[in-house]
Image (spheres, grey):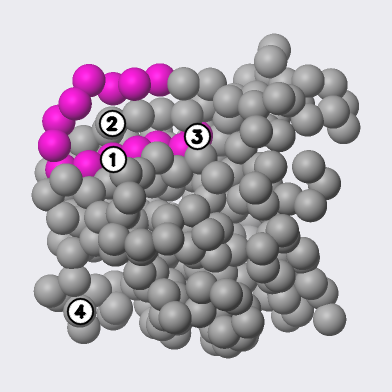
């Protein structure tokens, strides 16, 4: 078994192509929302982001969608083992099929750590291809579902590489969505950002910018990182 232990729950990641990683836990910790009641995690993988949000938002009911059968089964088991199990529902589906079947669902918060390699070399591991590789058409479909699935004041929050974030931003006007905020994620204070958390919604706002630094020095986490993850990671 391959189990990642958090302070309030465990994540069994046996057989999952994408393990618990910095991107996922950062998104789970940094998501900005005011007491959301309805959340959907698209491409939940092991279920770690959904579990973190269940811990953070006690009044939220959370749907989690995953297209890989092994990951969906493992996430479902992780949900069943968590103290928040009654508020978590696993759906083995492509996100397009899920939204097509649940047209009336409107969410306060949509989150995703989506496949992120655009036009990259394809891995020989099919599970990793499914979990990590995509193209621009994927994000077109995703944004269409986000527009249909968000309520009028809800937000969608994604963590993606810089190049992917630029592609998504270019697609937003076509889908009547607007950029609200950008977190630029950097390894060190003088590093070039390597990820962005982008917050989008249906209403137009002045775009806010914020930087987040993971390390003060090699293997030394920043105060901001420790503060964000102190309720989750056992090392803090």
Identify residue for label 4: 102
Q: Which mark is residue 196?
A: 3
| CB atoms of marks 1 and 2 within 8 Å | yes
Q: How many angstroms separate mark 4 from mark 3 (CA)?
A: 29 Å
**In the rendered structure, does residue 229 fall within the stretch colored magenta?**
no
Name the outermost residue toward the top: 190
Q: Secondary structure at mark 3?
A: strand
Residue 7 placement (x, y as % from top left):
72, 58
Q: Name the mark nearer the viewer: 4 or 3.
A: 4
Question: Which residue occupies 63% across, 20% down?
Answer: 192
Q: Nearer the viewer, residue 87 or 15?
A: 87
Residue 223 placement (x, y as % from top left):
71, 25
Q: Secondary structure at mark 4?
A: loop
Q: Secondary structure at mark 1?
A: strand
The reply to whether residue 109 is in sight is yes
Q: Earlier in the sequence, mark 1 or mark 2?
A: 2
Identify residue for label 1: 200
| Quadrant that contains the C terminus | top right
| CB atoms of marks 2 and 4 within 8 Å | no
Identify residue for label 2: 180
Q: Which residues are magenta?
A: 196-209
Q: How many angstroms separate mark 1 from mark 4 (CA)?
A: 21 Å
Q: How many angstroms separate mark 1 from mark 2 (CA)?
A: 5 Å
Q: Label 2: few (<14), some or many (≥20) within 10 Å?
A: many
Q: Earlier in the sequence, mark 2 or mark 4?
A: 4
Q: Earlier in the sequence, mark 4 or mark 3?
A: 4
Q: Secondary structure at mark 2?
A: strand
């Amino acid at each position: 078994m391959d189990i990642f232990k958090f302070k309030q729950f465990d994540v069994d990641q046996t057989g999952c192509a994408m393990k618990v990683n910095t991107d996922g836990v950062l998104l789970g910790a940094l998501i900005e929302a005011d007491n959301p009641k309805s959340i959907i995690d698209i491409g939940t993988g092991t279920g770690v982001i959904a579990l973190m949000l269940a811990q953070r938002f006690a009044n939220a009911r959370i749907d989690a969608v995953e297209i890989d059968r092994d990951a969906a089964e493992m996430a479902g088991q992780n949900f069943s083992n968590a103290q928040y199990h009654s508020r978590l529902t696993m759906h083995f589906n492509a996100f397009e099929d899920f939204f097509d079947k649940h047209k009336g669902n409107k969410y306060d918060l949509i989150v995703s750590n989506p496949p992120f390699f655009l036009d990259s070399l394809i891995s020989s591991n099919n599970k990793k291809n499914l979990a990590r590789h995509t193209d621009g058409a994927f994000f077109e479909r995703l944004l269409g579902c986000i527009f249909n699935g968000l309520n009028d004041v809800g937000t969608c929050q994604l963590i993606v590489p810089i190049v992917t974030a630029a592609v998504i931003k270019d697609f937003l006007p076509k889908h009547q969505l607007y950029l609200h905020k950008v977190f630029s994620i950097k390894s060190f204070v003088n590093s070039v950002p390597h990820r962005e958390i982008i917050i989008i919604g249906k209403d137009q706002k002045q775009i806010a910018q914020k930087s987040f630094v993971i390390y003060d020095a090699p293997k030394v986490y920043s105060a901001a990182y420790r503060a964000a993850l102190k309720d989750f990671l056992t090392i803090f």
